[in-house]
Image: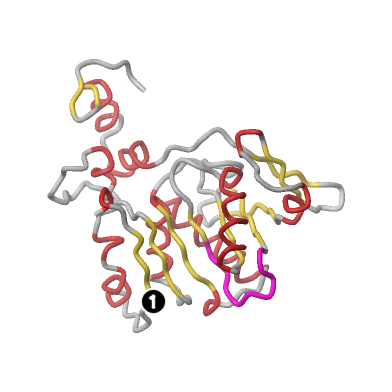
Amino acid sequence: MPEQGPRMNSFSLGELCWLFCCPPCPSRIAAKLAFLPPEPTYSIHTDASGATSLHLTERADWQYSQRELDAVEVLVTRTSRGNRVGCMFVRCAPASRYTLLFSHGNAVDLGQMCSFYIGLGSRINCNVFSYDYSGYGVSTGKPSEKNLYADIEAAWQVLRNKYGVTPENIILYGQSIGTVPTVDLAARYECAAVILHSPLMSGLRVAFPDTRKTYCFDAFPRSHVKYLSLALKGRGRVFDPPTLLLLRQVDI
């Protein structure tokens, strides 16, 4: 980031130049606004037999025992864009019908979310499958809008093909930036339901919340998450999954 100077809407002039001019393309601007990958809080170890295990750093803030940690399944898969993405399967309720495909927020990785997944799955009696975006955790590549779509597609294929979970038993759950790939996937595949938790207003509105007009160069436009049924119908789909929107005032 550039040095700070006079500020506008909480951004200095130098920061604005860095944001919009280096380089001035929507996907790069969106990445700077929307993606805040933390330092990795976990690693995936593979033993001589090929079995994988999860190792957390102190920053992951693990809240359970070693027994629960050993039960968390982790793996790495490859996306259609060539990146390797970390995946996590938390079996909180093995007999449960449903599994959440959880797309997390923009400033955490799987290590930080792991304890939350156990608590959430145990509370609602549901298994949780999640993944890290390109550039997060052990995932390679850089965060971008195109990579988001490839990342969730790869996670979906692992859940379907490796674990054998059928679409009618998968609930798509997206939080913050995770609502973007969640809506994209829901428009392409049938699923049990969709949950959008604090969906982004748009890439530009992350920096400038008072923006009223949607500009052509904006990324993650508000309509992308607000009108899921229209997205489905626009692709010739007749399937319209039950959809729950969890909103805060700042997200509206």
Residue at horizontal 61 percent and vertical 42 percent from the top = 138
Which image quarter is the N terminus in?
Answer: top left
Please name whichever residue, 79 or 56, is drawn nearer the observer in this view of the structure: 56
User: In the displayed structure, would residue 29 be above or below residue 75?
Assistant: above
Q: Which residue lies furthest to the bottom in this view?
A: 238
User: In the displayed structure, would residue 177 be above or below residue 185?
Assistant: above
Residue 208 % position (x, y): 21, 39
- Residue 245 location, quadrant: bottom left
Identify residue for label 1. 242
User: In the displayed structure, would residue 90 be above or below residue 2?
Assistant: below
Q: Residue furthest right?
A: 48
Magenta highlight: main SS: loop
* Residue 177 is covered by the magenta coloring: no
Residue at horizontal 58 percent and vertical 63 percent from the top = 123
Residue 22 % position (x, y): 30, 29
Viewed as shown, does residue 204 lie left or right of 246? Answer: left
Please name whichever residue, 83 or 136, is drawn nearer the observer in this view of the structure: 136
Residue at horizontal 73 percent and vertical 50 percent from the top = 69
- Residue 237 location, quadrant: bottom left
Q: Which amino acid does label 1 sit on?
A: Pro
Q: How many marks?
A: 1
- Residue 139 location, quadrant: top right
- Give the extent of the magenta segment: 92-101
Residue at horizontal 19 percent and vertical 17 percent from the top = 6
Q: Which residue lies furthest to the left in this view?
A: 213
Residue 2 % position (x, y): 33, 19
Secondary structure under tag 1 reads loop
User: Counting other residues with Cα less than 10 Å from the Cα at mark 1, is it few (<14), some (14-19), or many (20 or more)?
Assistant: few
